[in-house]
Amino acid sequence: MIILLMLFIILATICIIMILIVNLISKKTFSDREKSSPFECGFDPISSARMPFSLHFFLVAVIFLIFDVEITLLFPLIITLKLTNPINYFIIMMFFILILLTGLFHEWKQGALNWIK
């Protein structure tokens, strides 16, 4: 078992080193002003390519993704309901929901969920 673990670590390290070497060797460093500018059918750009983006919207989207992933982690608990002790199941489920509610309460107190400031 230890030999397999050592073999896995050695192979993983070799793969990582090979990927880094290939990345450094094949990196294209040609930087051109024309290539980095936005292209609009050969004409000069009408407006800036950089559009303003709401940082608050980004924060709400990240919070949604975090809570969404946590909710999807609850689904395997439903499948294992018949396989485990109901008391252990209840404790695990309540602990997980407590973590979700604590995170939601923290974000609420930080003001991340307020649309109007």
Image: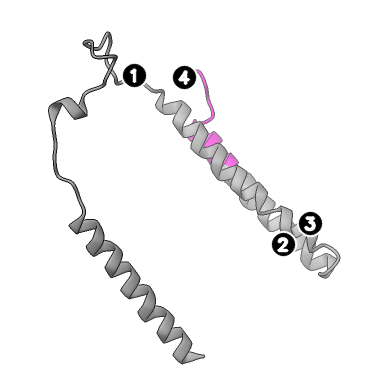
Q: Is residue 50 left or right of residue 107?
A: left
Reply above or below: 21 against 56. Answer: below
Query: What is the secondary structure assignment of the residue under circle 4?
Result: loop
At horizontal 52% and vertical 90% (from top left) the residue drawn is 1
Q: Which amino acid type corresponds to the residue marked 2 in the rendered image? A: Ile
**Of callouts 1 and 3, which one flags the residue occurring earlier in the amino acid sequence?**
1
* Badge nearest the viewer, 4 or 3: 3
On the image, which quarter does residue 49 sit in? Answer: top left
At horizontal 41% and vertical 23% (from top left) the residue drawn is 54
**Any mark on residue 92, and which?**
2
Q: CA distance from mark 1 to mark 3?
A: 44 Å
**Of callouts 2 and 1, which one flags the residue occurring earlier in the amino acid sequence?**
1
Q: Which residue is mark 3?
A: 78
At horizontal 84% and vertical 65% (from top left) the residue drawn is 86
**Any mark on residue 104, and which?**
none
Q: Using the image as rendered, state which of residue 114 and residue 2 is in the foreground.
A: 2
Q: Which amino acid type corresponds to the residue marked 4 in the rendered image? A: Lys
**Of callouts 2 and 4, which one flags the residue occurring earlier in the amino acid sequence?**
2
- The residues colored magenta run 104-117
**Horizontal and vertical percent position of residue 47:** 28, 10
